[in-house]
């Protein structure tokens, strides 16, 4: 029986936002629900009823009301996506005219002098905006963009870190009906231009550099290279972030400074009403096997999805301070900055989370009064491995939620949170994707926390596990699919006029059903266990092994810093080869004793099937710019694909890591 680490308090329905929503459903809709599972079932069986309730409950600000919720009479179980009557995602809320920025800046339940944006950075002193100051910053930035000729539909590109100015620029751009896009400044020139040459931005806002811990990183050459590759850019705006500006250009060859862009003006704050599916921003796939896909998200879908998640699942509202460690190159940044829409303040951080030590962010949690601390599973596991006990580092008594995403968090990570962070907070493990800019499985205040499991499928997200024939399964491993449309599914891919790239990305395997690319098990008590990417599956004698549990065991060893595992199929139907690559602590060499220890640990913790056929030492495991481990390019290189075709090096944080696999591919006798 799985261990329960946290249970909802007895008065959860009286004290939580989802409890208030349930009372509203009873009073306004005559609907009564017992367990969360009943509410979830209704939310995916009656999509129009559920999503209209979200619109009404949160009192969405609209300039014209929708004539319907989901056009065309969509029925549960009907196929959707390109080539069906319901397009990529169906047509949601036809007739509605609204603006995402207007709804975020409403900041319900918050007084004008409440600090709402707390920006901490290793490059400069903290920057804090109250609710009124945030609105004023957006008003002035929008006026500045208008002076630069920005029109609805134009793209505004941010080469900015996770700082308040990036949020101001997003909201100002959205207020005009223009389209925002961002890349974090650790992205190199090629990574950025691979993304932005596809969308032709008209304005570029960039920093001259940044500090990562005690290291100054100069980005002036990268900005020059980006600008040279983008003839569509009419104006470059420089944010002097490192404090070495030299006049209007602020250290960059720019047309104006950020201060000039947001110069004071009498222009009022206005919002251009746009259609529900008007593009709001463009995010990008990792681009490991080709050009990154420019994923277009709409005003209305993002707004409704984030209202639902932040309030009903994360239980955030006025008085809360939400933090999620992210850069502007990861969708969790877009998720974080929607929090003012539910009345929650946000804490932003830019810098090295391990500098001067791994306790830094936990001390910042106390300093800023965080009530919600979001991060990645690898960060939590790094803290655990370092022997850190955050509850001894800082007063974390205000923390009521701890979010974890980016990779599966293994059971020992769950146990560490409750032994070393707090016994009382709710660990909120979440999984979703850039493609939907949200989590579709996550926590709820109504559900217990089970060790090693994600608590529930999220409201309005019809997540199922499919066997290879497309049949839903419970209690066994299957392909994670979403079998009904969600409003925050992409409006489309930029430039994909016939929808073919969109169809290929999500709807090719199971026609009319969204395949996400993860392995998931849905348990008999409604929780979910994600065991890794389905395209990186380890298949041993017909038994599928997820990568996540493999890494959990190997990387728990003191000697192992990082690892990557791949399975190479035998074209003649044999067992194939399971290959493990390990990055070891400084000064260590892989020898037979350590190989035997790794094999013993895998046999004991998992099974004899998990013992690799060979173990190799490498200097680094390849990772994307957002830190995700990459098995597929390694597998492709080892099976003979040239490195340049196996992975787009600009999409990797450490492209040099591939050379070891290239060398091995040449040396292996049967590669």
Image (spheres, helix red, strand yellow):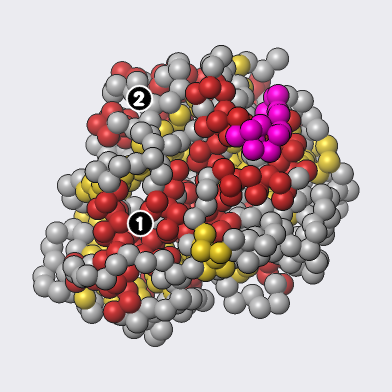
Residue 521, by quadrant, is top right
Q: Report if residue 71 is visible in the image.
A: yes
Looking at the rendered structure, the number of numbered marks drawn on it comes to 2
Residue range highlighted in magenta: 24-37
Q: Report if residue 613 is visible in the image.
A: no
Question: What residue do we see at 87% from left, 44% from top?
Answer: 471
> Which one is in front, 587 or 151?
151
Image disc number at residue 82: none
Decide: is 163 above or below 475: below
> Which one is in front, 161 or 33?
33
Q: Which residue is mark 1?
A: 167
| Residue situated furthest bottom in the rendering | 231
> Which one is in front, 299 or 259?
299
Q: Position of residue 373 (x, y in %)?
A: 40, 34
Residue 182, by quadrant, is bottom left
Tag 2's secondary structure?
A: loop
Looking at the rendered image, the quarter that the N terminus falls into is: top right
Decide: is 362 above or below 644: above
Q: Which residue is mark 2?
A: 398
> Which one is in front, 6 or 59?
59
Question: What residue do we see at 17% from left, 47% from top?
Answer: 125
In the visual, does 625 lie left or right of 1?
Answer: left
Tag 1's secondary structure?
A: helix
Q: Position of residue 243 (x, y in %)?
A: 14, 59
Q: CA distance from mark 1 to mark 2?
A: 25 Å
Q: Position of residue 82 (x, y in %)?
A: 75, 67
Instruction: Assess whether mark 2 and mark 1 are in contact (beta carbons under 8 angstroms).
Output: no
In the visual, does 503 lie left or right of 377?
Answer: right
Q: Residues within 10 Å of mark 1 (few under 14, many from 20)?
A: many
Of the two numbered discs 1 and 2 on the same chain, state the one appearing first in sequence. 1
């Amino acid at each position: 029986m799985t261990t329960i680490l946290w249970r909802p308090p007895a008065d959860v329905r009286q004290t939580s936002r989802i409890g208030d929503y349930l009372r509203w459903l009873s009073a306004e809709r005559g609907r009564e629900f017992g367990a969360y599972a009943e509410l979830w079932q209704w939310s995916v069986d009656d999509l129009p009823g559920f999503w209209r309730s979200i619109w009404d409950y949160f009192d969405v600000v609209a300039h014209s009301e929708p004539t319907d919720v989901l056009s065309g009479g969509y029925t549960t179980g009907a196929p959707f996506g390109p080539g069906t009557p319901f397009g990529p995602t169906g047509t949601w809320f036809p007739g509605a005219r609204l603006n995402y920025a207007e709804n975020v800046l409403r900041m319900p339940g918050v007084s004008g002098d409440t600090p709402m944006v707390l920006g901490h950075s290793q490059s400069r002193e903290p920057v804090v905006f109250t609710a009124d100051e945030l609105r004023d910053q957006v008003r002035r930035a929008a006026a500045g963009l208008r002076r630069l000729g920005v029109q609805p539909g134009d793209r505004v590109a941010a080469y900015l870190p996770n700082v308040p100015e990036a949020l101001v620029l997003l909201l100002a751009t959205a207020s005009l009906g223009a389209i925002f896009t961002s890349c974090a400044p650790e992205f190199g020139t090629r990574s950025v231009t691979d993304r932005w040459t596809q969308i032709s931005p008209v304005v570029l806002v960039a920093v001259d550099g940044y500090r990562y811990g005690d290291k100054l990183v100069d980005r002036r050459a990268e900005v020059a290279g980006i600008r040279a590759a983008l003839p569509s850019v009419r104006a470059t705006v420089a944010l002097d972030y490192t404090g070495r500006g030299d006049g209007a250009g602020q250290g960059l060859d720019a047309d104006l400074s950020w201060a000039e862009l947001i110069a004071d003006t009498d222009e009022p704050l206005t919002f251009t009403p746009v259609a529900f599916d008007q593009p709001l921003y463009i995010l990008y796939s990792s681009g490991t096997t080709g050009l990154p896909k420019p994923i277009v998200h709409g005003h209305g879908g993002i707004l409704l999805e984030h209202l639902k998640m932040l309030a009903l699942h994360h239980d955030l509202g006025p008085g809360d301070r939400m933090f999620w460690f992210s850069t502007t190159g990861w969708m969790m940044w877009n998720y974080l900055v929607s929090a003012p829409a539910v009345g929650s303040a946000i804490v932003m951080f830019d810098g090295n989370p391990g500098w001067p030590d791994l306790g830094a962010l936990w001390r910042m949690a106390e300093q800023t009064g965080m009530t919600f601390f979001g991060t990645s599973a690898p960060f939590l596991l790094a803290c655990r491995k370092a022997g850190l006990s955050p509850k001894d580092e800082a007063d974390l008594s205000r923390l009521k939620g701890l979010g974890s995403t980016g990779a599966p968090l293994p059971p020992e990570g769950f146990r560490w949170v409750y032994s070393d962070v707090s016994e009382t907070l709710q660990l909120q493990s979440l999984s979703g994707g850039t493609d939907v800019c949200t989590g579709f499985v996550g926590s709820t205040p109504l559900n217990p926390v089970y060790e090693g499991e994600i608590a529930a499928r999220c409201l309005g997200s019809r997540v199922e596990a499919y066997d290879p024939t497309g049949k839903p399964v419970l209690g066994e491993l299957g392909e994670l699919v979403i079998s009904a449309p969600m409003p925050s599914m992409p409006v489309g891919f930029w430039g994909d006029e016939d929808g073919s790239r969109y169809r290929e990305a999500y709807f090719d395997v199971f026609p009319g059903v969204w395949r996400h690319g993860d392995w998931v098990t849905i348990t008999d008590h409604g929780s979910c266990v994600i065991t890794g990417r389905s395209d990186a599956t380890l298949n041993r004698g017909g038994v599928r092994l997820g990568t996540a549990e493999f890494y959990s065991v190997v990387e728990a060893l003191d000697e192992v810093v990082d690892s990557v595992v791949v399975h190479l199929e035998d074209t003649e139907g044999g067992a194939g080869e399971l290959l493990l690559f390990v990055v070891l602590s400084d000064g260590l060499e892989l020898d037979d004793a350590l190989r035997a220890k790794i094999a013993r640990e895998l046999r004991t913790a998992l099974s004899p099937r998990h013992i690799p056929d060979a173990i190799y030492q490498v200097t680094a495991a390849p990772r994307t710019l957002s830190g995700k481990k990459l098995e597929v390019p390694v597998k492709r290189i080892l099976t003979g694909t040239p490195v340049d075709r196996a992975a787009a090096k600009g999409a990797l944080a450490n492209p040099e890591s591939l050379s070891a696999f290239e060398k091995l591919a040449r040396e292996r006798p049967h590669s």
